[in-house]
Amino acid sequence: MRLGFYLIPPYPLSCKIMCMRDLVYDQYRIKAALNFMIHMTIKGFFKPSKTMRIESLIDALDKIIKDYRPFKIYPSNLTIFEGEGLGITFSKEKNKILWEIQEKSFRAIEPFISPDCEFTKSELVGERFIPHITISMTDVTDDLMIDMMDFFKEVQFDSEGYTVHNFKLYQFNSTEWNTDNWIYSLTWKIIKSWCLI
């Protein structure tokens, strides 16, 4: 089992992302990202410690989320994450609240992460993913990502931004966490949903 804490983009932005993902499959037959819901990573996969109580984790996240009201996010660039995939990033300059929530959430979740969590080692030394939404991921080669960047160069996002208000904690299961094929046996369910009001 792994857990993940995500911001769910609003309907207009989710539709644009889904269209891009579908086009990636249509044009390139690359589909790993389609195994996920549309989401923005706040804290990606983490293996919970053996002593973690889910109620305690939810309470820690409750304490962060309760301080916020709906806010806007502003997509920045289509970006290649080397060895990881293609995604839309959200700059710190235009998305201060988003970055603040990510930092607070990571620190709140950190005590609940298993010391041997394979997905978190680099993040603990400050190499965290910046807030992003995945378009394609582990099954895409570097040369195809460059091709995709060109293919999507005319994609336009709303300059007025997108109002967000929904966060979710998910539980993920896979029979192959220790192989490169984990994405293809992935299943997930919602543990908790928060809605800013």
Image (spheres, rainbow, N blue to C red):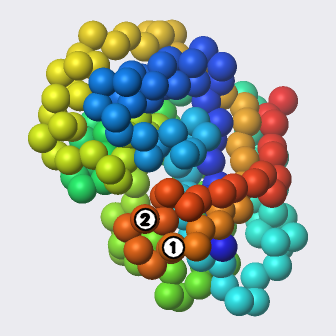
Q: Which residue is at the far left?
A: 143
Indicate the position of residue 88 as horizontal and vertical percent values: 38, 33
Q: Quadrant of residue 36?
A: top right
Taking 159 as reference, is 184 above or below it? below
The outermost residue toward the right is 55
Looking at the picture, which amino acid does disc 1 mark?
Answer: Glu
The residue labelled by disc 2 is: 181
Number of numbered callouts drawn:
2
Regarding mark 2 in the picture, which secondary structure is present there? Answer: loop
Residue 114 vs residue 134: left or right? right
| Front in this rendered view, residue 99 or 188 | 188
Residue name at image x 58 percent, y 36 percent = 38
The residue labelled by disc 1 is 176
Image quadrant in which the N terminus is located = bottom right
Q: Position of residue 192 (x, y in %)?
A: 82, 53
Q: Which mark is residue 106?
A: none
